[in-house]
């Protein structure tokens, strides 16, 4: 089912369900090459810009705005004089992040600038058109620039291009942001991304580390920030679906079918754990903030590796 088919199906069959409560598990399948991707379907027609913006401060204030501001304050992500580039992939997370920054700009006393950038790494026509449509409706003044990363990543790492693609995309965004005079780049990683990454590092990489809310780039004079650090994915899905927004899903034209299933397995495991312990995700994030080095066999930093036996 392509984007046009999804929209037509919704227009014809689902308008009568405008007031129904959202079931966030409802997805459809969209074809991407020979791969099949899950797509978040709107549960209502596309709402007006005014309604969408009000929902952030009203209906979803506690689920979206409050954790967004909490992360900004706790990790000191936005300061006077900052010029922040918000990277928009076209997915649900970056679209929300953009609207949150627009709201912040209107409400905050902090003197900062924000620009919106979107890299086209080789999106198919349907995805690119959908991105442009969403940007226009959401009134996000975004510069879309071309950088044919999908094709290059496939040539360099044909069997498993995802890591190379991610690394190249990050470098491209850093380059673009710095060229625009920005000192910070905001990405749309959310709370669940952090939890999943933390567990995956343990399960599949044999180390304990997490996704940091902000970090300095090694190769560029810029800082990366993750303002959705405390925003749960389920809240983002509800916001998108209940505002009738159809975000981009599976934008990659190369590697959707080659992507590791490990993140999906980890996400499913967490979902099972939440059923018996609703606070399990909070406990995982708390564990990253309460590491007791006296109870760790070994650790490392930029200076080297250490063992608890060093001071035994």
Image: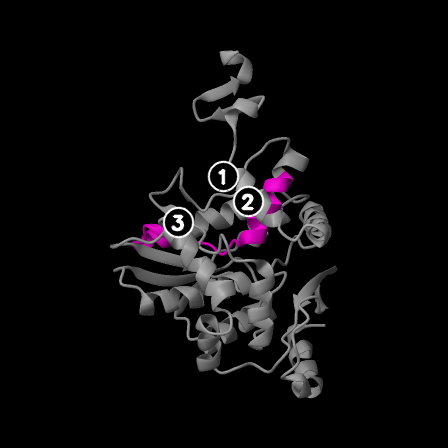
User: Which residue corresponds to mark 1?
Assistant: 289
- Residue 5 painted magenta: no
- Which quadrant of the view contains residue 57? bottom left
SS label for mark 2: helix
Few, some or many residues within 10 Å of mark 3 (<14, 14–19, 20+) = few
At x 63%, y 83%, the residue is: 19
At x 55%, y 60%, the residue is: 122
**Position of residue 55 measured from the top left corner of the image (x, y, whole percent):** 48, 75
- 158 vs 171, left or right, is right
- 257 vs 211, left or right, is right
The quadrant in which the N terminus is found is bottom right
Give the Cα separation between the discs numbered 1 and 2. Answer: 7 Å
- Residue 185 painted magenta: yes
User: Which residue corresponds to mark 3?
Assistant: 74
**Position of residue 208 measured from the top left corner of the image (x, y, whole percent):** 58, 33
Q: Which mark is residue 285?
A: 2
**The residue stretch that appears in magenta:** 176-200
């Amino acid at each position: 089912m392509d984007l046009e088919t999804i929209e037509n199906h919704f227009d014809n069959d689902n308008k009568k369900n405008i007031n129904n409560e959202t079931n966030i598990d409802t997805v459809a399948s969209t074809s991407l090459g020979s791969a099949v991707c899950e797509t978040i379907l709107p549960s209502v027609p596309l709402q007006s810009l005014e309604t969408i913006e009000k929902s952030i401060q009203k209906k979803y204030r506690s689920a979206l705005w409050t954790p967004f501001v909490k992360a900004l304050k706790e990790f000191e992500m936005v300061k006077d004089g900052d010029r922040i580039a918000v990277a928009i992939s076209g997915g649900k997370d970056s679209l929300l992040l953009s609207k949150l920054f627009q709201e912040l700009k209107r409400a905050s006393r902090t003197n900062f600038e924000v620009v919106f950038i979107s890299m086209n790494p080789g999106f198919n026509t349907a995805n690119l058109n959908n991105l442009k449509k969403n940007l226009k409706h959401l009134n996000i003044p975004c510069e879309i620039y071309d950088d044919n990363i999908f094709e290059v990543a496939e040539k360099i790492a044909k069997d498993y291009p995802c890591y190379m693609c991610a690394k190249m995309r990050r470098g491209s965004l850093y380059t673009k942001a710095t060229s625009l005079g920005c000192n910070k780049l905001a990405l749309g990683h959310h709370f669940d991304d952090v939890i999943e990454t933390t567990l995956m590092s343990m399960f599949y990489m044999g180390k304990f580390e997490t996704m940091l809310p902000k970090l300095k780039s090694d190769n560029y004079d810029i800082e990366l920030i993750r303002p959705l650090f405390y925003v749960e994915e389920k809240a983002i899905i509800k916001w998108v679906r209940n505002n009738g927004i159809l975000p981009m899903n599976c934008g990659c034209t190369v590697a959707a079918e080659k992507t590791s299933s490990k993140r999906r397995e980890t996400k499913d495991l967490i979902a099972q754990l939440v059923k018996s312990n609703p606070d399990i995700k909070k406990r995982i994030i708390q564990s990253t903030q309460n590491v007791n080095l006296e109870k760790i066999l070994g650790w490392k930093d930029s200076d080297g590796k250490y063992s608890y036996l060093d001071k035994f």
